């Protein structure tokens, strides 16, 4: 827990509306829960001086995410009970920007199967407006409706119910304006209005009844609490005068900040690519299912970034204006991950200027002011975060969409700097802004690339489900890439490492290793292929995970042809850790083959990260696309990590294809996923290094291994029979070892621990290595590892009790000062 002084939360002591009530005579009356739900504040607004401040909305008052989400979800369940299951499924939920975007989304979740849309004040280029209306008392009035599906608000017009959600139902004017704007073009029989509190006067209630009769529709109301606000005569003028006095007294006062400035860390949240950032353009049940599947993983990423004090302290997840639902759900997931170890709270920034008064009887105790950072259509202006300063937060997780990830956000007077002065740690998580594609006929899926135009493999050996980025400059120096990756400024798949060019000594090592291990590899190829044919036959479709899986997939195809006369289809597909699998490629496979026939192939397992990534990615794809049948099980040549049940061997030995990069993999680069290069209907990218043709040994590797097929046939038959009868359930021994090593060596990040000969080789060829752990007595399998380590100045530490032959450790505190100018590691860094 942080040593900073924290303001204790007052419970049943002072109502957070007393300050305003005493000075202006504003009275709040209603059922017993009303004062627990609402406080009062003042704002500089020519139309309404007072502000009802909700304690369960998550806008102005930090609250437990589960409480905020539960408030909306519970209202949604009540609407579902009111409508009945069938009508609830046909309903459309519409929330109001900015304060009710998250509430409306939670209500839609409570209905379970209803699509959701919220109004917005952000115009989006190229998106047609389906409607709009005014909110008379709001600080910013114009609401736009920008659904991606233009039929969303018209679909089944007379058969479906429109559910309108706002945080408070004060006069009913906003709802009446909305219904009037939408009912004329698309009349409905029924509307349901949902709000946390109903504060209408008797006259406003009568007006809604008359309006419903006028349009000939049933209008129901579902709220959590009911009451009224009594405003004495002249309250607007007296409120404005009081605000002016308070602001004059506070002029020049500097917020009390914690000592020093907290570090700001960007994390790769890896929001699912197919899930919109919110309901601005619509949010469907399939989007909801994909998000639910991804939330635990994203919460773990946030948890991993929290320092030790914050994990047991007070953490705020701070959303951004209309972006309320995404940070709210990240907050609920973070609550579950941290459990009772930390106090998780949730709130968001806002456009609305509210007076802050540091008094227990006032709802807005403190405010942070910073410039708008999303290029708003109405021009630059101040934005606000309330009740954050002085609240004793050990960490703040700021969640913004990519549109708002601008220089203004990172400026010295920007939001992040303001937060850094009032918290022990600031984490920035960016959700990609979703922009609808124009409605059009389904895009024609691209065709696979084949050699010799793309790769040095024979055209029948593999079809690459990639797009050719050979003419795009993607390579970056190793040190620059590592610094960007570890700082959260870039994902590893957004660039390529410079292709390693082996020395004559290293090339000789590869040749010797291939001569020594060809029979061993042939045996593993035969065993895994026969296992696949026995369990997934008779004609599986091999789909390699590019690029390490591709040479193995080609060899499996050759074994099936040589031993059984089978001509198995073989493709290579991209999967990116933290970003999932290429869904366009999956759609192509589903359009051309039975998904049940697809067998995913990789070279080896390390700790099993890709195994888990593939399972999660397939689950998300099936939930969002409706296409089912893909088996996420991976078949690998070697499974030293104990992560899969289909393998050729579980020994950790040198697979020569791991020694080199493209020159043993058909001259193809590692795959690339970058938003400016890969569109929604594109395959992930890759490069064909034609210029390295003279160094290409891809064919030599295939020839050397296939030449030993007949020699190992009897051993393969015996081993396959034994494996098919054995218990091959994954043990995840490798994952446990990686977690132990991560803690023992003070790394605290399993992604920086790369186990096994293949992964250690990758560390030395592509990343900034810190040290190598070698199993004592590992022998010739590590000769090339020792040579690479010597060339890069990386220490090799002999250890016992290692389930792998070796483990590569990426530098855990990397900056460009952590290595020399030649890329060699600095000892003891």
Image (cartoon, helix red, strand yellow):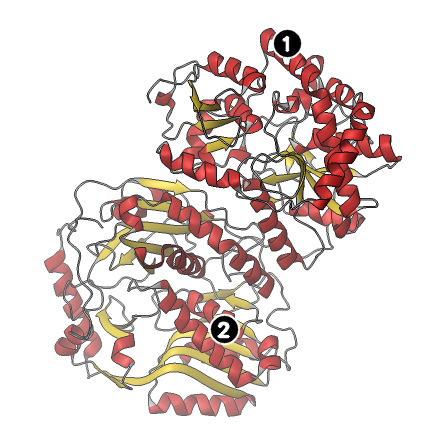
Quadrant showing the C terminus: top left
Q: Position of residue 392 (x, y in %)?
A: 21, 54
Which type of secondary structure does the marked residue at label 1 adopt? helix
Q: Nearer the viewer, mark 1 or mark 2?
A: 1
For residue 210, side relative to residue 53 (left or right): right
Which of these two is toward me, 717 or 781? Answer: 717
Q: In the orientation shown, which residue stands out farthest toward the right?
A: 565
Q: Which mark is residue 110?
A: 2
Q: Which mark is residue 637?
A: none
Near mark 2 (Cα within 10 A), the count class, few <14, some 14-19 or many ≥20, is many
Q: Give the Cα separation between the discs numbered 1 and 2.
A: 64 Å
| Residue at horizontal 38 percent and vertical 15 percent from the top | 820
What residue does disc 1 label?
Answer: 508
Q: Is residue 177 above or below residue 477?
A: below
Q: Is residue 647 above or below residue 455?
A: below
- The answer, for residue 444, to whether it is visible in the render is no
């Amino acid at each position: 827990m942080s040593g900073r002084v924290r303001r204790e939360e007052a419970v049943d002591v002072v109502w957070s509306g007393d300050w305003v009530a005493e000075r202006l005579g504003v009275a709040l009356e209603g059922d017993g829960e009303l004062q627990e739900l609402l406080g009062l504040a003042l704002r500089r607004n020519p139309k309404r001086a007072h502000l009802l401040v909700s304690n369960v909305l998550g806008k102005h008052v930090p609250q437990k995410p589960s409480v905020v989400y539960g408030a909306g979800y519970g209202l949604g369940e009540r609407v579902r009970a009111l409508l009945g299951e069938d009508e609830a499924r046909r309903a459309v939920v519409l929330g109001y920007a900015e304060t009710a975007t998250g509430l409306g989304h939670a209500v839609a979740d409570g209905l379970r199967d209803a699509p959701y849309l919220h109004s917005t004040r952000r115009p989006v280029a190229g998106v047609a407006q389906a409607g709009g209306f005014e909110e008379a008392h709001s600080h910013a009035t114009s609401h736009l409706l920008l659904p991606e599906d233009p039929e969303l608000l018209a679909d089944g017009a007379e058969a479906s119910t429109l559910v309108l959600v706002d945080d408070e139902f004060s006069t009913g004017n906003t709802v009446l304006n909305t219904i009037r704007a939408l009912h004329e073009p698309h009349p409905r029989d029924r509307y349901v209005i949902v709000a946390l509190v109903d504060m209408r006067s008797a006259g406003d209630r009568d007006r809604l009844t008359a309006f419903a009769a006028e349009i000939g529709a049933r209008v129901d109301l579902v709220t959590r609490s009911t009451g009224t606000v009594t405003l004495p005569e002249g309250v607007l003028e007296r409120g404005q005068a009081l605000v002016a006095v308070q602001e004059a007294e506070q002029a020049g006062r500097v917020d009390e900040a914690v000592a020093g400035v907290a570090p700001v860390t960007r994390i790769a949240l890896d929001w699912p690519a197919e899930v919109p950032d919110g309901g601005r353009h619509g949010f469907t049940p399939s989007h909801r299912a994909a998000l639910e599947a991804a939330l635990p993983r994203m919460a773990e990423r946030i948890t991993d970034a929290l320092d030790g004090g914050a994990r047991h302290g007070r953490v705020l997840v701070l959303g951004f204006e209309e972006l309320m639902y995404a940070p709210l759900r990240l907050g609920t997931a973070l609550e579950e991950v941290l459990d009772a170890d930390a106090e998780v709270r949730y709130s968001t920034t806002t456009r609305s200027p509210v007076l802050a008064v540091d008094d227990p009887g006032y709802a807005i105790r403190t405010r942070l002011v910073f410039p708008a950072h999303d290029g708003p259509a109405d021009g630059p202006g101040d934005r606000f975060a309330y009740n954050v300063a002085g609240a004793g937060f050990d960490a703040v997780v700021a969640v913004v969409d990519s549109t708002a990830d601008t220089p203004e956000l990172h400026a010295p007077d920007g939001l992040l700097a303001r937060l850094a002065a009032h918290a022990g740690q600031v984490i920035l998580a960016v959700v990609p802004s979703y922009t609808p594609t124009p409605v059009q006929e389904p895009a024609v899926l691209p065709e696979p690339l084949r050699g010799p135009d793309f790769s040095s493999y024979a055209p029948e050996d593999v079809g690459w489900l990639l797009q050719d980025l050979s003419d795009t400059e993607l390579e970056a120096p190793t040190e620059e890439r590592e610094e960007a990756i570890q700082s959260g400024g870039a994902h590893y798949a957004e660039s390529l490492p410079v292709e390693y060019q082996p020395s004559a000594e290293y090339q000789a090592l590869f040749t010797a290793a291939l001569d020594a291990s060809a029979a061993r590899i042939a045996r593993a190829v035969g065993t895994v292929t026969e296992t696949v044919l026995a369990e997934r036959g008779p004609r599986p479709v091999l789909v390699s995970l590019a690029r390490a899986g591709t040479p193995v997939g080609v060899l499996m195809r050759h074994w099936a042809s040589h031993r059984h006369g089978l001509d198995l289809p073989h493709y290579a597909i991209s999967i990116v850790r933290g970003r999932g699998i290429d869904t366009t490629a999956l759609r192509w496979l589903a359009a051309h083959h039975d998904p049940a026939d697809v067998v995913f192939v990789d070279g080896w397992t390390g700790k099993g990260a890709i195994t888990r990534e593939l399972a999660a990615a397939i689950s998300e794809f099936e939930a969002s696309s409706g296409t089912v049948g893909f088996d996420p099980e991976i078949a690998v040549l070697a499974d030293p990590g104990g992560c899969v049940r289909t393998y050729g061997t579980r020994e950790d030995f040198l697979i020569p294809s791991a020694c080199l990069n493209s020159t043993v993999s058909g001259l193809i680069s590692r795959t690339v996923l970058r938003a400016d290069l890969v569109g929604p209907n594109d395959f992930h990218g890759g490069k064909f290094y034609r210029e390295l043709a003279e160094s290409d040994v891809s064919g030599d590797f295939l020839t050397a291994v296939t030449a030993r097929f007949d020699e190992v046939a009897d051993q393969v038959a015996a081993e396959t029979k034994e494996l098919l009868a054995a218990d091959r359930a994954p043990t995840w021994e490798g994952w446990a070892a990686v977690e132990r090593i991560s803690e023992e060596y003070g790394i605290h990040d399993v992604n920086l621990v790369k186990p096994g000969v293949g992964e250690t080789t990758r560390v030395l060829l592509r990343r900034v290595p810190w040290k190598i752990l070698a199993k004592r007595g590992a022998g010739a399998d590590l000769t090339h590892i020792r040579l690479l380590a010597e060339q890069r100045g990386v220490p090799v530490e002999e250890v016992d009790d290692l389930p792998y032959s070796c483990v590569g450790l990426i530098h855990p505190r990397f900056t460009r000062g952590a290595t020399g100018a030649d890329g060699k590691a600095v000892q003891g860094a």
